[in-house]
Amino acid sequence: MEAEYMKSIIKSRISWAIAILLAVVATVTAVLPFVFMVFNSFKGKFEMLTKGVFAPPEKWNFKNYQEVLSGGFVKYFGNSVFVLCLSLLLVLFIAACAAYPLARFKFRMNSFLYAVIVACMAIPIHITLIPVFQMTKRLQIYDTIWAMIGPNVAFALPISVFILTSFMMGIPKEIEESAEIDGCNKYRMFFIIILPLAKPGLSTLAIYNGVNMWNEFSFAYTLTQSPKNRTLPLAVWDFQGQYSMNTPMIMAVLTMTVLPMILLFIFAQDKLVKGMTAGAVKG
């Protein structure tokens, strides 16, 4: 018995050691590119070639960031924030309004509509570029930031409805029954009861869709032309052409582009984990 107990302890310690080792490797793999990018963004134009790419900068040079900010980066950033906020609000509201009847009401077309929405998740973005381009030209919103909101919402809705429907199915029906006894109608029940209970799922979708919308390039490149109407991924594209021989300057642009999403994930990761697990248990 004592020998078996010692074997189980040894196996447990080995398992923990392997898990910790894998976690360290995964952390280094994820953090090292960001450290590389930040260090090189503070270097001079040729310091990266002479001192090594992973060496800390000899002198922390903030001129790269000053030049990027004075080169129109703030305008790109503002456009991205506007498109992201408006697109996310529309996606979350429409997805919640669609998921509630699919999860709670029984009607003839329920399963068919749900299947169609799930099937839309398989539509590739790139086959819609030409039709969307033609549509924006006809609506006379080409080369405006409004042109990017429609595609962002349309391609985020299927997976958002899919996740929210599964999440709302896990909300106990007894809560709604008690509200109905108190005289609460369906509209008040949705806004007062269901939406607050669905906050973990909405937070998960906000983070997931927010990252995708923040990094969206194809539609932004196709539907805009003027620098004043472009978003941050296109800022990276434009700055890469402008500073093709100045790698630290490009690293500064990349750092300022990815930093907001990294900070968002750091401060909202608990909501992301709760949202991914909250709908997994019924009742």
Image: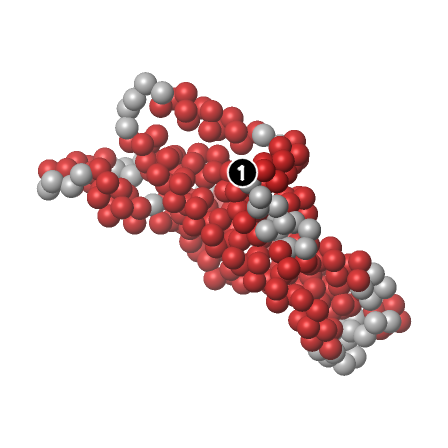
For disc 1, the neighbor class at 10 Å (few under 14, some 14 to 19, many from 20) is some
Vertical order, 11 against 174 (above or below): below
Q: Quadrant of the N terminus?
A: top left
Q: Pick whichever, 78 or 185, lies toward us.
A: 78
Instruction: Examine the rendering and report whether any part of residue 204 can be seen.
Output: no
Q: Pick whichever, 273 or 235, lies toward us.
A: 235
Q: Residue furthest bottom?
A: 59
Q: Quadrant of the C terminus?
A: top left
Instruction: Examine the rendering and report whether any part of residue 64 can be seen.
Output: yes
- Residue depicted at 57% across the width and 46% down the height: 141
- Residue depicted at 80% across the width and 58% down the height: 241
Kind of residue sitting beneath label 1? Phe
Q: Position of residue 257 (x, y in %)?
A: 64, 61
Q: Position of residue 250 (x, y in %)?
A: 75, 63
Q: Residue furthest right?
A: 50
* Residue 265 located left or right of residue 127: left
Q: Which residue is mark 1?
A: 155
Q: Pick whichever, 276 or 22, lies toward us.
A: 276
- Residue depicted at 53% across the width and 53% down the height: 83
